[in-house]
Amino acid sequence: MIPIEGVGEIAGQYDGMLIDQFGVLHDGSKLYPGSLEVLAELHRLGIPVAVMTNSGKRAAANVTRLTGIGIPRDYFVDAVSSGEVAYQLLASSPAKRAFIIGKEGDDYGFDHFDLVARPQDAEVLLILGSDAPRTSLEDYERLLKGLTQPAICCNPDRWMITSSGLYPAPGAIAALYEAQGGSVRWIGKPYRDIYDHALKVIAHPKRVLCIGDSAEHDVAGGRGAGLATLLIKTGVSEGLSEFEPAPDYLMERFIWR
């Protein structure tokens, strides 16, 4: 694990970058200081960037979020979300009726399913988001109790960053279902499907750096895909000093120099 001051110290060693969204580029409402400069410099150098995110929403919704928060559209090739990867993988699913667990009022774009109002009526459970703190883990435990349908978790994150603190994320809900004996397929970082998709988006360069704020997801996933890793000590890693697995590089903030 090599401490560095800025991405500019090592950018020339790589032909492509997979960069996490929440906790690296922004905090959910505003860009972190310096993050836009990093993207601008990578764009100037011609290094393709895919923004990777454990978001249950599809790619287009995440592109809209990124541009709406102030990132020029030509600074990244595309957003690669776990929701988009799941949508494409499930396109040929024989299941037709799905129950979505997510944030109330959100549209996740899974239009190839007939969405049902009760989980008991579904052939598959789609765990796409969390309605915490309005809905607690205990509420979700009661909702899932006694169900036997297969579940797809499209966001393995256990915790989500909000302006008012950390709250249980879809990964925590899926873990509850597994603990009850339910079958869960996990899609998103650190699992391989999302990395295969992201590498395709940036045209499979030989030397790729994964950048994120979570050792559990970003570092483990990057290493599992055979890629170099850089951990940023913001987001879920803020205030931590030990990381497992250890990244190749470590930075305090996502800055260029």
Image: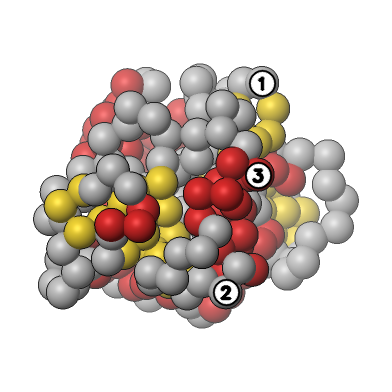
- Where's the C terminus, which quadrant? top right
Say above or below: 67 vs 61: above
Q: Residue at x 33, y 48 (%)?
A: 118
Q: Is residue 210 visible?
A: no
Image point (38%, 69%), residue name: 149
**CA–CA distance between discs 3 and 2?**
16 Å
- The answer to whether marks 3 and 1 mark residues whose Cβ atoms lie closer than 8 Å is no
Q: Which residue is mark 2?
A: 181
- Image quarter of residue 5: top right
The percent coordinates of residue 70 (x first, y second) are 37, 21
Task: Tell me the number on the disc at residue 138.
Answer: 3
Number of other residues with Cα within 10 Å of mark 2, as a class: few under 14, some 14 to 19, many 20 or more: few
Q: Which amino acid type is shown beneath numbered disc 1?
A: Ser
* Towards the viewer: 94 or 250: 94
- Residue topped by disc 1: 164
Judging from the image, the colouring scheme is secondary structure
